[in-house]
Amino acid sequence: MVQRGGRGRRTLLERESELAAVDEALGELAGLRPVGVEPPERPHGALLAVAAPAGLGKTSLLAEVRRRAAVKGCTVLYARGGDQEQGVAFHVARQLVQPQLAGVPEAELRTRLGSWYAIVGPALGLCAAADGAPPDPQGLRDGLDWVLTHLAVQRAPMVLVLDDAHWADPESLSWLAAFAPRAEELPLLLVVAYRPDELPDHAQALRGLPGRAGRRPLGLEPLSAPAIARMVRESLGSHADDAFCRECWAVTAGNPFEAVELTAKVHDRGLAPTENGAHLLRDLAAAVKGSGLIARLERLGTSTVRFAWACAVLGTEISPELAAGVAGVGAEEAADAADRLRTGRVLTGVDTLEFVHPLIATAVYRAIPSGVRVALHGQAAWTIVNAGLGSSAAARHLLETHPDGDPWVVQQLRSAAHETVRAGAPDAARRYLARALREPPPFDGRAVVLYELGSASLLTEPATTVNHLRAALEEPITDPALRHGIVYRLSQVLAHSDRLVEASEILSREMRRTTDPRIRLRMQAEQFMWDAFRADEPESPARSRRLARLADRLTGRDLTERYIIGLRAWDATLRGEPAATVIEYADRALAGGLRWAAGEDRGFEVPVLVALSFLYADRPGRTEELFIEGIADFEHAGWRGGHLSFAYTLLGYVRYRRGRLAEAEDFARAGLRLAERVGPGTPAHWYAVGTLVEVLLARGRVAEAETVADTYAFGAPFPAAVVFPDAQTVYGELLLALGHTKDAALELAAAGRRLDPRGMRNPSWCPWQLHLARAEAYDAPERALATAHDAVERARLFGAPSAIGQALRAAAEVSAGAARGKLLEESVTHLERSPAGYELACSLVALGAELRRTGRAKEAADQLYRGLDAAVACGADGLVERARDELAAAGLRPRLLRSAATDTLTARERAAAGCAARGLCPTEIAAELHLDEQTVVRLLSAVYRKVGTDRTGLAAALGE
């Protein structure tokens, strides 16, 4: 495959098509084109995958890629997977990125990475992990995406080369596999090589990676007999005869690695390359690999063999000093052994050693007797820790040792798990802690290992977390703080798994055990919170009374007290107590601060509920302020899975309540995309789908709302947890919009039977009565009227103008005669004092239609035009059409829709709008524009306000 070229460089043989693909990709990356071909608008990247068995020249091909890229002025990032390093989290990611950033001073690095510093820094080995909650895996991947995108743009053109990807660690590989399709949108060429027959389960994603323009991976074929003959003659001299060369090809099967090694052995033996010596080639070839290689190694002496074993255990980038320590030989003896292994073409390098080829490393490692191999891994762990390299570097070796009840091993594995989980690699942490549990830990230390093991599984395997935490509680625990931490974490994961009853019960049991009044108060706060989310709570009114009495006695001096006061605000919201009461408690809860990412054992639920209390009390501006702060908290902590899904979904719901439907849809879809990462059936998924269906119905896109509901199985059975908007009510509203009035009435009446006994009577929070009255109007008009008037009374008790206005419009829709017009006029009056822009538009159009029917044409025109303008501003397409139809029926000409004021957009707003018009979500826009998501959210909000259209109309508005 290779030939000696000028200045020692090797020339690849029979790889012309592969190199042509490389040259084409590099040309496109640099913006070059053959003569007569138009260059692209901007340089763009691609993905090249090389899949071939061992020894066929993947590494040589990738070395040539790196050389040609450097010649063209490209920045080259390089990494190589290692057989022994597969379990080291982010080993490949660190190889790629560290050389680009490791020399940057800390202050400058913080400035460059901004809010990503604390999230990606530990994973990339750029800084130590801070205390506090670790980032979730998705948040970390988003951060790594940002870093690589930033590097690709700032140091363009860039070539990223990953060799032996089948040995890459799962964390790095899952990130790169997800990032790879984006290479074509960046000045980045991504080149990956792997052995297709040795892909482990976690590397299967490589098979699905598209090649250039969707091509299959490049496959390398064995070399032909003429190519092998050329290699032999270049190495041994032109006098090598045909028979000898042909035999070289036959015994190596055209494998270039074996051919290179074979010619080296021939040279070392002084064998004449003629037909007379050809019969010796088969034995020489056997010495290149397998048992022949090991036999050759053993002839180098015992100390050399042991040094080679130590190197095989250490893997790649081998420190000679560490290898000497693992082998148990002195410095001079180690230097001699390294020299012999270099001469024997086993090792290469001086300051840092590497095996000449991974095949040799694998053969040496597998040849180590099992007992010796275990001992060497144990010695490697001790040597690494003793050298000050840390427990994380030693942990992979401890995984290979036999359990022996050694407290030192347990401590090192726990320490490594602590570092790893905070670096964003919970799977690796679980492996370390599971091994620590098998050691086993001391009798009184088992509970804390189980607790840490359960915590490491929290975000990815909640059922496993529950098992570990329950087992931890069964162990003898002498530290009360540990027991309390286990209880908080267990109740949290049970609640997030839709097992709210169990979460409440575990807290109730522990409250009876503890003697500390502050701990009992904290547990009571947690229990109040999870009970508030229970859709089947049997004693909700009694719980509300206890909560009210307790909240009135507290001052809010610490976070626990503020949580309880915040829960009181939310309970008052659900029960429909006066809005002034809700705001009073919500303000008290916020007085000392309520961070959304307060810590590992504090959920974000209470801060969210307090923020939403302001929303239902017609203070959406305050709600949005709190949500923006909360999203910033989540992003700073690296929580970008379920947490960020909730935040985006609920921010979309806030925009819906304010009548900004285009923005609401975008946020709901962004929340749904994030929720799909978490998984179907989770609360995050119910929130996102319910909100999106609600928004689509408001926009008049009923068929699309039905499609969304069908796609995501949005219907019975509904979740055991309380979600908002209430899933059953939204489903009933969908059925009503589809014309299934009887089915709608059944669902909505069932929602009422579920909520009313619990004291959840606020139509502002759940308008089931409003939709039920509309459904009942077809078959039971008197009952419909009674239902609507009861909703009006409840809304008046709550006192929020938006709630009263909506309830009055529902009452008008099921009323007749003059009462209908009076109710609509009063509805408009209340809604004009509220922030509910969409609801106001609905009432204006309904009032205009009623005035037209009663012959009051001039007043009807005024209200219909106002309603049309409001509907356009909201993005309520269905309501716009209804208003225009009413105007046409009145003989009036509908106004033309106002044009988009794109000339008022700033440069950054226009850039964000362009990305949104292409269908990118805020996360993707942030990565492309190198902004944080909080800034993107603000930019898009400004765009929608100025342009007055939704995402689907942005392209036309921008003239793109």
Image (cartoon, rainbow, N blue to C red):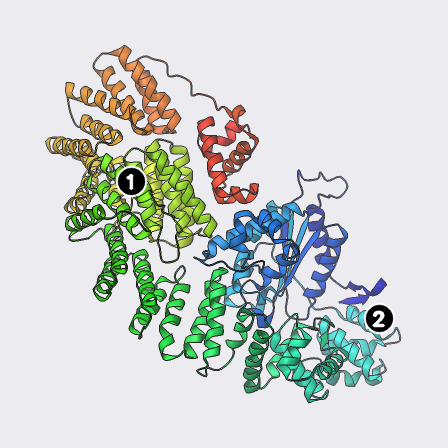
Residue receiving disc 1: 613
Residue 234 got which mark?
A: 2
The front one of 108 and 872 is: 108
Residue type beneath disc 2: Glu
Question: Is tag 2's residue or tag 1's residue first in the polypeptide sequence?
Answer: 2
Taking the spot 77% from the left edge, 82% from the top edge, the residue there is 281
Above or below 892: residue 67: below
Quick one: quadrant of the C terminus? top right
On the image, the x and y values in percent for residue 694 come to: 32, 38
Taking the spot 28% from the left edge, 50% from the top edge, the residue there is 561
Q: To which quarter of the image does residue 868 belong?
A: top left
The front one of 429 and 955 is: 429
Residue type beneath disc 1: Ser
Above or below 92: residue 706: above
Q: Is 538 displayed left or right of 384 in the figure?
A: left
On the image, the x and y values in percent for residue 376 come to: 58, 82
Residue 413 got which mark?
A: none
